Image (cartoon, rainbow, N blue to C red):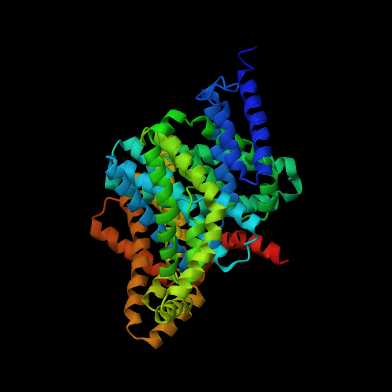
Amino acid sequence: MAENLKLVSDLALILISAGIVTIIFKLLRQPLVLGYIVAGFLVGPHLNIFPTVADIASIEVWSEIGIIFLLFGLGLEFSFKKLFTVGSKAFVTAIIEILSMIAVGVLLGFIMGWGVMESIFLGGMLAMSSTTIIIKAFEDMKLKNEPFVDLTMVVLIIQDVVAVVMMVLLSTAAASKQSAGMEMLMSIVKLIFFLILWFVVGIYVIPTFFKRAKKYINDETLLIISIGLCFGMVIIANNVGFSSALGAFVIGSILSETIESERIINLTKSIKDLFGAIFFVSVGMMIDPQILVQYWKLILSLVIITLVIKAVVSSGAALVAGATLEDAIKTGFTLSQVGEFAFIIASVGVSLGVMPKHIYPVIIAASVITTFTTPYWIKAASPLYLFLDRKLPASTKAQLDAYSLLGRKSGNKNWRSIIVSTLPRVLIFFVLSFAVLVLLFDHLWPFIKELKIGEFLPQWLYNTILAVISLILILPFLYGMVRIKQKTRQMYIDMIEENKANTIVVVVWTLFRFILAGFFVFSILVNFFKYTKWVIVLITIAIILLMMFSGHTLRRLSFLENKFMENLNAKDQTVKK
């Protein structure tokens, strides 16, 4: 019985120490995350002043659950729609900042004699800022209405997405035991495919379920369903080769688009806080004072790079993206810390054997130091801007103002608008069509074959029936791929009238979409019939032409898209009411 209570005693020690230390940090007006880390350090195995945790392995399991709930909570507060409606300024800022810091990390890694993989992920960790700490700083300093805050928050969201991708790439690197470029590229393609598939299917199914079962779902049931979906997606993500953190983030982002998102956030907040506290305490337990002393030069280098180089790089990135000089400097200085996502990445990298073990406590130390400096660094941005405003020549300031105004103006529509107008639809329906093919040919038809139904029919008739069923099942998605809405069609007409050269782009892009649809038709036919390839190509063309000239009939197949858009916009419609 005493053995069974070890975990209980460890949790009691963790939570009591975390509670006491965070009260002290609250009195000192410091972030609670730091309190958790300090509490973990005090009860960890490397400091014997206080009682220590007995079963480290069990705590590591609980901390894994903590990562799942942290990512689930992040997903609940994440919005893909918001991400794609903020304009290009935040994207440009985030991409320049992330790539630049990765380059700095690679340079530092090479100086220390690290390999390419370790150096890239060191740079990626340096690029991550702390969403939790920055939000807390904004609240404490009453800066939420400042112009630079929206830009900063969207950059943080993009960083979080990149962090999730990095964890996927870490898993790939661990599996392949090398940093092969093709392995990484295929992992990214696979990630995009499954993200689109999960998001589209999730938005189509989950809101519909909530809507139809609303009168049967109370708070208790909703909590159980939400956590069940979270763990279910974690298992699915693991089964297809991704991290559990990605699965938790994806299902959280899907639930964030439902009308029940606010209730789910409120219901799961306490659970997220509990397991999040356990995770951050476990982080503190990994801090070894001897390693900190041994690698103090590296820690100091990371702190200086974060406070100085990252501030300059982030400010420059915002300036290039079209922000004003004042907003750019404030954004850059706000982003100058190593976020908690960095040591989540470090913990995953160390556990997979991709990163050196000492990087974990080193990153934590750099994160703790730069977290303490965050509010002071934000305050320092205004005096620096005023200093530069006084010292810069009038001509330079005028050029910066003109560049900033230019970034706010929307340019004329060109050939890019033609492609971008339908690219998301094409990408989504391409992924869904591919998923249908995989489902049919890898699962359904082999199952039918095992039932030996084909033995009672001539082979040609059996193949024809399966081919027709396959075409019928995939047809709604192929139609979604080639369909052009009336609004888009009118935009094409206007652009052709404005510039005849746009005709070529419209024709080529339209043909490309029909060729994609033809690829799926061809893939189905070639699996069932042994005619020459040219005959199958001709049949494929005939089917595609039939689709082109049967638009009025096939328009009924757009119910899938209509239902998806209805579910996606249901939350916004509810808020307006």
Q: Image quadrant of residue 563?
A: bottom right
Give 393 or 197, whichever is nearer the viewer: 393
* Residue under the point 57% across and 41% down: 34
* Residue under the point 35% across and 44% down: 459
> Which percent across, then down, holds residue 418?
40, 74
Q: Image quadrant of residue 376?
A: bottom right
Q: Is residue 452 visible?
A: no
* Residue under the point 33% across and 62% down: 540
Check the image and report above or below for 361 versus 573.
Answer: above
Q: Is residue 508 left or right of residue 233?
A: left
Q: Quadrant of the C terminus?
A: bottom right
Residue at the limit of the structure toward the bottom, as seen here:
497
> Which percent across, then down, holds residue 494?
44, 84
* Residue under the point 42% across and 52% down: 192
Residue at the limit of the structure toward the top, as seen here:
1
> Which percent across, then down, holds residue 533?
24, 56
Give 343 or 576, whichever is nearer the viewer: 343
Give 461 or 428, whichever is nearer the viewer: 428
> Which percent across, then down, holds residue 487?
51, 77
Q: Is residue 145 left or right of residue 324?
A: right
Check the image and report above or below for 160 versus 17.
Answer: below
Give 313 or 9, whichever is nearer the viewer: 313
Q: Is residue 136 visible?
A: yes
Q: Quadrant of the N terminus?
A: top right
Q: Give the number of marks.
A: 0
